[in-house]
């Protein structure tokens, strides 16, 4: 938990100038929550009558993190059972750490769970140089590859949402999460009534889980593991069917190629397993918990993320490729702040590389806050 005055001061200045915070639609029906610097837990069940009241609270309280429900309630400030749920916007979370990229260990820093000592990136087994502790939490400073990875995933989700589900692109709001991933807010009222199970089915579809072999025309011969191919009458040219048909290079005009593939794999069950492997690989890696929870409070667009000091920032889908979160979402000021580095660390922010080897450094606020939020520096 960051309790530093310098971090709080930078957050205060941000909220005071405030131009990026997005008040949600139907604001008076939303539940808000926030976390405070140096205090564990979250203040929840708040509600605001309008954008003015919300922003005034941010300036007054200077929260470390701000959240808003995707759900609409009749009585947002009452306990959960009495709120009277009226529906919830569809949301998605793509977290870079779920992509398990091979570059991550090279920019992860162990922080001792016992004494908080930070160490440089690790090559061998962890032992705290200060207290000998063997347990550490790892903080990662995402690299360009990490960001490319989550951008690719986000682009894939856009394609599924607009292509397969037919959601208009202007209703798909994409945000950098403020740390290492992307958030989606779908502004389409027709999804609001969906319950948790329906959202879970949707997650399964997007993740490529549970596509049945029959949907691409592979059927089991009665009483055996043999299969025969009969293409579905509705064709192979949309959604998952199209993706699988393209991957396996099968055309809808002849069943010969698919019949041979099934034979090669060794029958119905083996093909089914192969199909499952293919679709999971092509599916989108989204956090299922975020999407299926219809009572969640989700980071409010335009607010700061205390894991980094970066902004949860709207990102134009058409410009996703050139979007640079470490420049665009780095919105804190440049007043000089003295920090004590807990370890040698490196980050690239606002186009400048900060490769800090010495113990004491004077950095622009945005960089100082970044390292402090990561737990790699403290105020000097
Ligand atoms: Zn230690
Ligand atoms: Zn990386």
Image (cartoon, rainbow, N blue to C red):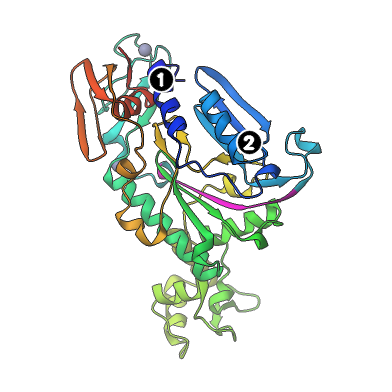
Number of callouts in the render? Answer: 2
Question: Which residue in the structure is indicated by mark 1?
Answer: 135
Instruction: Judge by depth and name the residue closer to the eye, 222 or 45.
Output: 45
Label 2 crowd (10 A; few <14 / some 14-19 / many >=20) = many
Q: Is residue 54 magenta?
A: no
The magenta stretch is 86-96
Residue 82, x across and y down, in percent = 81, 37
Above/below status of 314 relative to 55 = below
Quadrant in the rendering for residue 114: top left
Q: Earlier in the sequence, mark 1 or mark 2?
A: 2
Q: Is residue 95 magenta?
A: yes
Question: Which residue in the structure is indicated by mark 2?
Answer: 32
- The quadrant of the image that shows the C terminus is top left
Please, what secondary structure does the residue beneath circle 1 have?
loop
Residue at screen point 37% across, 29% down = 139
Q: Is residue 97 visible?
A: yes
Please, what secondary structure does the residue beneath circle 2 have?
strand
Quadrant in the rendering for residue 192: bottom right
Residue 213, x across and y down, in percent = 55, 72
Q: Is residue 297 visible?
A: no
Above/below status of 140 relative to 255 = above
Position of 70 with respect to 19 (left or right) is: right
Disc 2 beta carbon < 8 A from ligand 2? no
Residue at screen point 56% across, 48% down = 288
Above/below status of 153 relative to 273 = above
Position of 362 with respect to 325 (left or right) is: left
């Amino acid at each position: 938990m960051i309790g530093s005055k310098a971090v709080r001061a930078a957050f205060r200045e941000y909220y005071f100038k405030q131009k990026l915070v997005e008040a949600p639609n139907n604001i008076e029906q939303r539940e808000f929550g926030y976390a405070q610097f140096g205090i564990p837990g979250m203040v929840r069940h708040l509600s605001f009558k309008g954008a003015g009241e919300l922003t005034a609270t941010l300036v007054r309280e200077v929260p470390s993190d701000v959240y808003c429900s995707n759900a609409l309630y009749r009585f947002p400030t009452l306990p959960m059972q009495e709120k009277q749920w009226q529906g919830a916007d569809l949301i998605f979370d793509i977290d870079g750490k779920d992509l398990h990229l091979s570059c991550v260990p090279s920019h992860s820093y162990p922080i001792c769970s016992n004494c908080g000592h930070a160490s440089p990136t690790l090559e061998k087994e962890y032992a705290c140089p200060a207290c000998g502790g063997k347990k550490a939490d790892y903080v990662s400073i995402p690299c360009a590859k990490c960001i490319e990875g989550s951008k690719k995933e986000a682009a894939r989700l856009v394609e599924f949402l607009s292509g397969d589900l037919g959601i208009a692109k202007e209703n798909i709001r994409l945000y950098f999460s403020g740390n290492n991933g992307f958030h989606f807010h779908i502004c389409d009222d027709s999804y609001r009534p969906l319950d948790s199970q329906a959202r879970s089915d949707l997650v399964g579809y997007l993740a490529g889980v549970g596509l049945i072999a029959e949907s691409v025309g592979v059927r089991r011969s009665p009483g055996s593991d043999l299969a025969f191919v009969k293409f579905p009458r509705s064709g192979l040219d949309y959604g998952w069917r199209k993706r699988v048909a393209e991957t396996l290079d099968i055309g809808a005009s002849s069943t010969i190629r698919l019949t041979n593939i099934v034979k090669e794999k060794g029958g119905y069950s083996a093909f089914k397993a192969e199909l499952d492997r293919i679709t999971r690989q092509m599916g989108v890696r989204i956090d299922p918990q975020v999407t299926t929870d219809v009572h969640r409070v989700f980071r409010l667009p335009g607010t700061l993320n205390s894991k980094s000091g970066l902004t949860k920032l709207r990102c134009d889908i058409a410009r996703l490729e050139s979007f640079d979160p470490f420049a665009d979402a780095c919105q804190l000021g440049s007043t000089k702040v003295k920090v004590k580095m807990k370890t040698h660390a490196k980050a690239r922010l606002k186009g400048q590389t900060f490769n800090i080897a010495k113990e004491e450094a004077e950095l622009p606020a945005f960089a100082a806050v970044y390292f402090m939020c990561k737990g790699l520096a403290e105020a000097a």
